[in-house]
Amino acid sequence: MLTPPPCDLSRYPPESAARLLTCRVPVVTEEAAIAGVERLLLTHAREFESLGYVYVVDAAGRLVGVLSLKEVFQQEKRRPVAEVMVTRLVSVPPAADQERVVHLALAHDLKAVPVVDEQGRFLGAVLSRTLLNTLFREASEDLLRFGGIKRSASMFDNVLTLPVFTSLEHRLPWLLLGLLGGMLAAGIIGRFEGTLERNLILAAFIPLMVYMADAVGTQMEAFIIRDLAVNPELDFFRYFRRQFLIVTLIALITSTALGALSFILYRAPKVSLVLALSLFLGIISSVITGLVIPYLMGRLRQDPANASGPVATILQDILTVAIFFVIASWLLG
């Protein structure tokens, strides 16, 4: 029985093939006979972590072939290993990412994947149970990322296990910030009390203005959280330009529709102009709350579930109300 040469595998990344392999697999030289391989397996079976494959190396320890357990016991005892081994090998370097190792195993229907160094010397193999565990972890991670979760589940609040006061500590500050923002929005409306008294119809449209801007911002927030999860290397400025174009078209269509409908209903051209212009600019401003804030939260490694929603919502409400009443005061006096 041969043992793969020792090497310093600690220098490789945690999610590399080197960290997954085991050296406790059958290794023989190409000069060995089938009878010798059988004796090796029967005598040292307890010392191996897997008997799925027998790996064949040359005098320098380079991997030159592989035999399955079935092939060993089907061959004549006197035949040399070199005559029956499979020489078309699938192997990976020690620095290979674990996802690549799993992909190769699935693509080639392998129970284990051999790992070789830069000189082709056999270091060990990544076994089937390790491949399955890695596949499960990677699949779970991908599912979480598609849901907008880019860190492990243990780093997020588990409502069922986290103490009540800890959950309160994580969530309440953002909501208190929203409360203060709501008071600020009310103060802005109070500053334009005169405009509102002279044009009482404007009060009926405050919920509509706030809803439309919030809705567009929430759409963008969901998109960017998902897209950043799927593609962490996303070109944000290119993404911003494309989203800005789409939001501008949405703002143009919806504000034109609102202006036309309000004119038909109230026959007040200036009021219709205020509504249309306010909705247009309110929706445009949602680019800040829908894209920029979630992006910044991600860069600051804050959980969007706790932070981005409350912050973006109250900031958008303040912007929408301010835009609405500034334009109303300007055009209606």
Image (cartoon, rainbow, N blue to C red):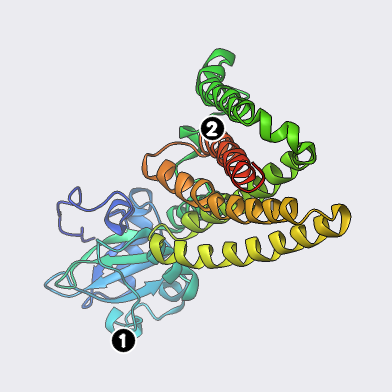
Judged from the image, the secondary structure of the residue bearing numbered disc 2 is loop
Q: Which residue is mark 1?
A: 83
Asked whether residue 140 is in view, the answer is no
Q: Are marks 1 and 2 in contact (CB under 8 Å)?
A: no
- How far apart are labels 1 and 2 at the CA level? 64 Å
Q: Which residue is mark 2?
A: 306
Can you say whether 278 is above or below 105 in the image?
A: above
Query: In terms of depth relative to the viewer, which is nearer, 53 or 31?
Result: 53
Image-based side of 257 in relation to 193, left or right? right
Residue reaching furthest top? 165
Image-based side of 276 in relation to 106, left or right? right
Query: In terms of depth relative to the viewer, which is nearer, 102 or 210?
Result: 210
Residue reaching furthest bottom? 83
Q: What type is the residue that disc 1 sits on?
A: Glu
Residue 157: x and y in percent read 53, 29
Q: Residue at x 64, y 65 (%)?
A: 252
